[in-house]
Amino acid sequence: MNTELVIDVQEAEIAIALLENKQLVELNKEKGNVQFSVGDIYLGKVKKIMPGLNAAFVDVGYEKDAFLHYLDLGPQFKTLQQYVQAHYARRTKTIPVPKFKLEPDIDKNGKITDVLSSGQAVLVQIAKEPISTKGPRLTSEISIAGRNLVLIPFSDKVSISQKISSNEERKRLKRLMESIIPKNYGVIVRTAAEGKKVAVLDAELRSLIKKWETATEKLKTVSFPGQLASELKRTSAILRDMLNGTFNSIHVNDEIVFNDIHEYIETIAPEKEKIVKLYTGNVPIFDQFGIEKQIKSLFGKTVSIKSGAYLIIEHTEALHVIDVNSGNRSKSGNDQETNALDVNLAAADEIVRQLRLRDMGGIIVVDFIDMHQNENRNMLFERMKELMSKDRAKHNILPLSKFGLMQITRQRVRPEMHINTTEKCPTCKGTGEVSPTVLLDEQIENQLSTLVTSHKLKSITLKLHPYIAAFLNKGFVSKRMRWSFRYHCRVNVTPMSSYHFLEYHFFDSKDTEIGI
C-alpha cells in the first residue's frame, strides 16, 4: 500500500490529509493554540459531586466543567492523590515515583463520594475532547504515550499489544521491559515495538519518565486549575501512531513545520527521514495532490459509489444513519440478489472510508439493500469486519438484523469532521439578485488596475475558480498576458478548487492578500 501524508499549513490552521493509494482516508484540521486535546494533563478542581451518576464535574479551565466518572479514576487513585498533595504548591524536593509509597487500590464497585469532595485538587488527563455542548471527558489513570511504549505511573503491569501475534516476541518484550522498567511504573508495549532492540526501548522509556517528571515538577508552581503537560501536536501524534513501512512520502508546504517534522522523524525513525519533502509549487498543495476535489465529493450528504450506486449520510444528535442505494445499478442484467450483494460490498468499502474520514463516532446504523441468502449476509458482515480491522478507533460491529440494518459503535474522542461542500450561487452570490456575469473580467481588471497603482506592485497573484482561470489563460496572447503588458506588472493566475465560481482574491509576492 502506498501511504502519503500531505500537510497544508495556513495562518489559522494546519490541515493534515492521509492518502492511501492516492485516496483520501483521513482528514484532520488543527487550529493554532489548541487546548484540551486528548492526552493533555491538568491539575483540576472538583466543582460538583454527582452521587446519582457516580461521577464528578471538574474545573480544568474550559468554559464548561469536565466529566470524571468513578470508573475512570484508576485503581491507584489514592496514591496519585497522595502524590499531588505532597507536591502541590510546595517547594519541597520532588519525590521520585519509585520511592513513593503506594496506597491500596480503590474499590472498583465504590462510590465517588468515598474518594472525592468539592473543592479538592485532582490530577486528570483529557480522555475525550469537548464535543458539541459537552465539556471534556477526563481520566485519572494517567498515561504518557510514545512511539513504542505507553508509560503508566503508579502501576506495576507490563502489557503487550494484542496485535503482536508471535508468542516468542511477546515473551521477549515482556522479559525485556520487566528488566528495565523502574519500580512503581507500568508500561504498555505498542505494536510498533515489535522487533525493537533493548537500547531503543530503554531510551524511549527514559524520555517518557522524564516527560512525567517535568509535568509533576510544575505542581509546585502551577496556577489552579492549570495545564501540566500537553500532548504532541496533531501532526506529530499522527506520525507517532501511524508511521510504518507503507509510508513513502510526507509533503508539507511550510519550511518551519517541515524542519519540525524532519527532526521528529529523525528521533522516532531515522531510516525514514528522507521521506519528508518540502513542497514549493505555486499551485496550492491540496490542489496539487487532488485532495481538494476529493473533499468536495466526499463530505456532502450524498456520496457516489462506482457503478451508479450511492450513499445518503445523515447525522442526528443520537446517532449517524447511512442509507445504501443501488441507483442505476438496479438496471443491470443480473438477478436482484446478485445486484444487492455487489452494491453492498462496494458500499462497505466506502462506508469504512467515510467513518475514518469524517471521524464519525458513537452509534452508526447502516441500511444495506435487503439480501435473502444467509451466505451473502454473512459475507457482507465478514467484509465489514475485515475492512474495519484497519481502523485505529475502538469499534464493535453487529451482524445484519432481520430488517437489513447493521449496527456499529465507534469510539469518539474528538468532534466529528464536518465540511460544508455547498457553494454560493454563481450568479447571485446568495443575494437572489443577478449581476451581469459577462462583465466579470472587466470587474477583475478594474480592481487590478486600482491595486497596481495604489500599491505600486511589480508582481501580483490572482486566485480564482479553475474555470475562470482557464478563461483568463486562454489563447496565445491571453487576457492575463495583456494585463501584464498594460499595467507593467507581472500577473499570475492560480486556480483554486476551494473557491466558488465567481470568487477571486488578489495576493502580493509574499502571498499576503491585498484588499481594495
Image: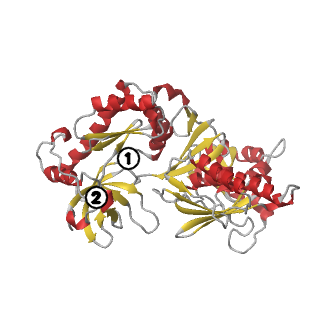
Residue 2's x, y, as percent? Answer: 63, 35
Quadrant in which the N terminus appears: top right
Residue 3's x, y, as percent? Answer: 60, 37
Residue 516's x, y, as percent? Answer: 60, 59
Residue at the extreme right: 333
Q: Badge 2 is on which residue?
A: 108
Asked whether residue 465 is in view, the answer is no
Q: Badge 1 is on which residue?
A: 231
In this rendering, which labeled residue sits more in front, label 2 or label 1?
Answer: 2
Q: Residues within 10 Å of mark 1 (few under 14, many from 20)?
A: some
Q: Amino acid at mark 1?
A: Glu
Q: Amino acid at mark 2?
A: Lys
Q: Residues within 10 Å of mark 2 (few under 14, many from 20)?
A: few
Up/down of 61 relative to 245, above or below: below
Left or right relative to 162: residue 280: right
SS under mark 1: loop
Out of 21 and 176, give the one closest to the viewer.
Answer: 176
Residue 30's x, y, as percent? Answer: 48, 51
Q: Gap between marks 2 and 1, in whole Å?
A: 28 Å
Residue at (42, 38) in percent of width and height: 190
SS under mark 2: loop
Asked whether residue 296 is in view, the answer is yes
Mark nearer the N terminus (2 vs 1)? 2
